[in-house]
Image (cartoon, coloured by chain):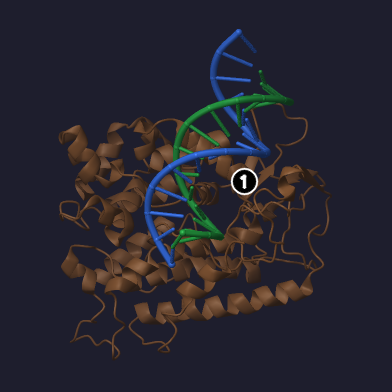
Chain colours: A brown, B green, C blue
Amino acid sequence: MYIHTHAHRFSTLLSPLFPLCFSADPPGLMGPVVGMSPDKKAGSPGSQGGACGAGTLPEAESASSPLATSLDRLGRAGAGAAPGVAEGGATEDEELTNLNWLHENLLQNFSLGGPEDIEGTPDTDNTLSSSSSSSVSSSSLSGGQAAERDPLKSKPPFSFSLLIFMAIEQSPSKSLPVKEIYSWILQHFPYFSSAPTGWKNSVRHNLSLNKCFRKVERSLGKTNGKGSLWCVDPEFRPTLAQALRKQHLPNTHAFYTPPASPPSASSPPRHLLLLEQGSALRESDFDAATAMMLLKSASEQYTEPLGDQEGPIDLSPRRGEVVLVSRDPQQDHNYSSSPPPPVSREGPSSTAPRRPLLLAPGPASGGGCSKRVRLRQAELDEELKEAAGSLLHLAGVRPSPQAPVQRGRKSRKISRK
DNA sequence: TAGCCACTAAACAGTC
DNA sequence: AGACTGTTTAGTGGCT
């Protein structure tokens, strides 16, 4: 019962972001979501499906529009799902890193829905007031208290990279101008609305430095709008998704013990530990949620028409347009585990300016690495196994014993460098 | 303690 | 001219 409620809630939440994961599955099985706490690193890259794979990138659409509908639903359906969690007495640090924060802050932030929430319309309050006290109650608290107690006023436990990733991934076109990224962050993380403007600098800094993000020139000839669109490098998309997953693992594992035997209806699974701690989520929820993300990432790679191309990235414009994509392999500011040459920060990047690549229509220009692709597929197989195990776990079926635990370290090590 | 990483601040150049 | 965007460098603090 409980599991279904939240599973559905989270699947509804993530469906715009990871539609393949949540589209047709029974809510009880496909639910959950994602907690993330700051993990700095990520695992292996290697997606072929990707944000930029759509080719010609349209003008950025509102980052929040697609989410709004489902989240509005979410806000209504999930109202009151976790009352009192915000008042659980957790310290700020805990809130920033544990699952409660995610539940209260991210999810309910997401549930704010539409773009109008940027301005803090009454709808925001309505949505929140029925489901949680976090935002509303914060306004009734004194400033310092609110900042301490209200996760909405706390700094999000995500790195800027992940924030940007989420923003871009959520956009319909999988690409956003900086300004839209700002807006998305502001919308979903009100902390930044009151934060000094330096965070915007950090966002730009991240976009520039982080190889996970790629600059896409707006349609040639179009002069409206400043700057470029930014998208997630498809190659690093799974990496970032994995980074999101990894964020919560250390915390969850701190209190999670896999059930010794398959759970039964009469005996609640032992891993429903968070319930006792005032959290609305269980580890299995998160595990499965991140599995969803993995599945999504992976499924894109396997389900999207790859054609004959072997290259990991398809930025081929669909209608013969030319897309400019910034990509400099020498830059090493990323979370990649891919084998970019270890370049120090002071290395060649300083002398080799990052410039956009001109990708002609047709097969991906970055291709020709079938070995690499095979390696990636092996990694993805591995991830899919984990994801499947997570799903089985969520469904009450005990996966192979080693499956759930092994991931963290490995991929963390693979990351950057 | 060293190294890595994320974050922040700042400077600067280019564009609108 | 001013705001915005994008790049780069440098410093700091946390974590392992």
- Which quadrant of the figure has residue A266? bottom left
Residue A83 found in image quarter: bottom left
Residue A107 position in % (x across, y down): 34, 53
Residue A69 percent coordinates (x, y): 41, 47
| The C terminus of chain A - image quarter | bottom right
Q: Which residue does the image show at 45% across and 60% down from the upper left?
A: A39
Residue A3, image x and y in percent? Answer: 28, 71
> What kind of residue is marked 1?
Leu
Left or right of residue C15: residue A226: right
A89 with respect to A153 (left or right): left
Q: Is residue A24 visible?
A: no
Indicate the chain on which mark 1 is placed.
A
- Decide: is A359 above or below C1: below
Image check: A141 left or right of A382?
left
Choose between A410 and A71: the one closer to the eye: A410
What element does badge 1 sit on? helix
Q: Is residue A241 left or right of residue A6?
A: right
Residue highlighted by disc 1: A209
| Of the pair A71 and A184, the residue shown nearer to us | A184
Q: Residue furthest bottom?
A: A261
Q: Is residue A403 above or below residue A350?
A: below
